[in-house]
Image (cartoon, rainbow, N blue to C red):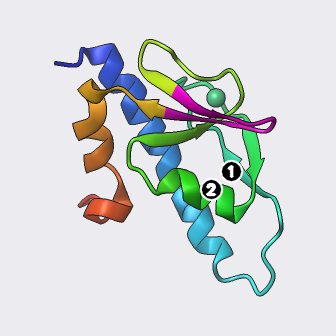
Amino acid sequence: MADERTLRVSRNESRFRDINEALRRDLDHLPHRPELVPFVCECGTSTCSDIIEVTFAEYEQVRASSRRFLVFPDHNLPEYEDVVEEHDRYFVVQKHADTAALVDATDARVFGPPPD
Ligand SMILES: [Zn+2]
């Protein structure tokens, strides 16, 4: 069972994912998408406000899994997640199994937006 700090980290990451998903939906309405899109770092540190520039294709690849998050290089927290991809501009982390239920349940793509 995940402890309180582990859950807090996962909730932070899920919150930043929601922010990025809202940004992505807004950009869908633009006639010309920029090549590199500034998304927020989805790391588990609540004070982080770093910006990561990725292409739509790179972003969509991360979003294909509820358990994967887009973070700035070296913003991964090894206690809670594994780095599955390392790029110059960003890392992709995958959450450990103990928080899979939380990050799945908070993924709007899988379960729809949370109720008010
Ligand atoms: Zn970060």
Residue projecting furthest to the left: 1
| 111 vs 4, nearest the viewer | 111
114, above or below 28, in the image: above
| 40 vs 68, nearest the viewer | 68
Residues tagged 2 and 1 counted as in contact (Cβ below 8 A): yes
x and y percent of residue 16 in the render?
A: 52, 43
Instruction: Give the residue number, with chain letter if any, for mark 2.
Output: 59
| 11 vs 87, nearest the viewer | 87
Instruction: Give the residue number, with chain letter if any, for mark 1.
Output: 39
Q: Quadrant of residue 99?
A: top left
* Amino acid under disc 2: Tyr
Question: Looking at the image, which residue is at 74% across and 41% down?
Answer: 51
Residue projecting furthest to the bottom: 31
* Amino acid under disc 1: Phe
Magenta-highlighted residues: 83-93
Please tell me whether the stretch drawn in magenta is mainly helix, strand or loop.
strand
Question: Looking at the image, which residue is at 24% across and 14% down?
Answer: 3
